[in-house]
Image (cartoon, rainbow, N blue to C red):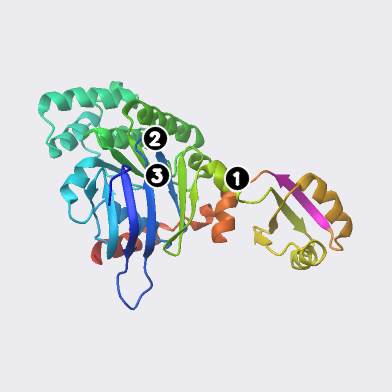
Amino acid sequence: MIQKSIIEVENLIKQYKKSEPKAVDGVSFSVEEGEIFGFLGPNGAGKTTTIKMLTTLIKPTSGKAEIAGFNVATQKDQVRKSIGLVFQDQTLDENLTAYENLDFHGALYGIDQKKRKERIAQVLQMVELTSRAKDVVKTFSGGMRRRLEIARGLMHFPKVLFLDEPTLGLDPQTRAHIWNYILEMQQKERTTIFLTTHYMDEAENANKIAIIDKGKIIALGTPLDLKKDVGGDVINLKTKDNQNAAKELAEFFGIKDVKEKDGLLYFEVEDGSKFVPEFIKKLTVHVEEVNVREPTLEDVFLGKTGRALRDEEASQTDVWRQRRRMFTRN
């Protein structure tokens, strides 16, 4: 495979047992250097398995993946030196200071003491934690810990930084600050970001997005292009009888792709402002609520998978069960 991008994935497959369906089934995509790449998928879709393969934690069954020109199956050490990881769960040592956490990480990667000191100053300044360098991590807020983890992931000058739900559980203001740091870091260091998130507003920051479901990539493109594929305006409709309303939408207007979520019917039309008055007149079912808007990435995800991304957040028990499976079934 000729290396054209910082991440190259070709027909990647992972099957744990021959009696089971493929967890990842022929996935192919590429990520350009300096891009923010959003990787989205429902629980069990193959997202976590793909990331584990790209970060050398599990070996592919077949196919090929390269990070910065290194094969994830046969050149694990080179790949690991080329990537940074910020996991969803905190992995900082709470009994060490911010400086000590960064210094230890740099030493593990073989960075000499002088360069470590310089780099620690750089990354702490980037995430605005310079004044807290000597403070023990257990005194930090959740947002400060996340910022420190991002700084730690950058210590060894990685070419690709993997961020797994970097703002999950943080308040909106802290989420916004974290993203300011991420975007600044991407621009200053030209680091490629491989991101998973449940927040669709965050996914809008991505240069390119891949949606994976049932082990296959079902949508790939820029946020704008994916939203264009939705097919016009989005209408959310609440009636006294949603089942009959859906039947009448199909019968009167030929709209058969009607989904239901949280008691609302969801469908797309070309020109919502003209369509709404017409269908309200024709429907025999009483309309309680109607909303017309432009499509969002949430609509793209719902349309492609039949599920809302936030509905796919696993319980903590599910998360640990999945991770235990990943580490014990290589």
For disc 3, the marked residue is 195
Residue 43 appears anywhere in the view: no
Give the left or right position of residue 281, taking residue 234 as reference: right
Give the left or right position of residue 144, taking residue 256 as reference: left
Magenta segment, principal secondary structure? strand
Q: Position of residue 295 (x, y in %)?
A: 64, 46
Labelled disc at residue 143: 2
**Within the image, what quadrant is residue 57 found in?**
bottom left
For disc 1, the marked residue is 296
Whether residues under marks 3 and 2 lie with C-beta atoms below 8 angstroms apart, the answer is no
Figure check: 53 above or below 274? below
Q: Position of residue 270 (x, y in %)?
A: 73, 49
**For marks 3 and 2 on the same chain, the one whose residue lies earlier in the sequence:** 2
What residue is rendered at 29% in x and 32% in y?
Answer: 151
| Type of amino acid under label 3 | Leu
Q: Range of the magenta residues? A: 287-293
| Type of amino acid under label 1 | Thr
What residue is rendered at 36% in x and 47% in y?
Answer: 88
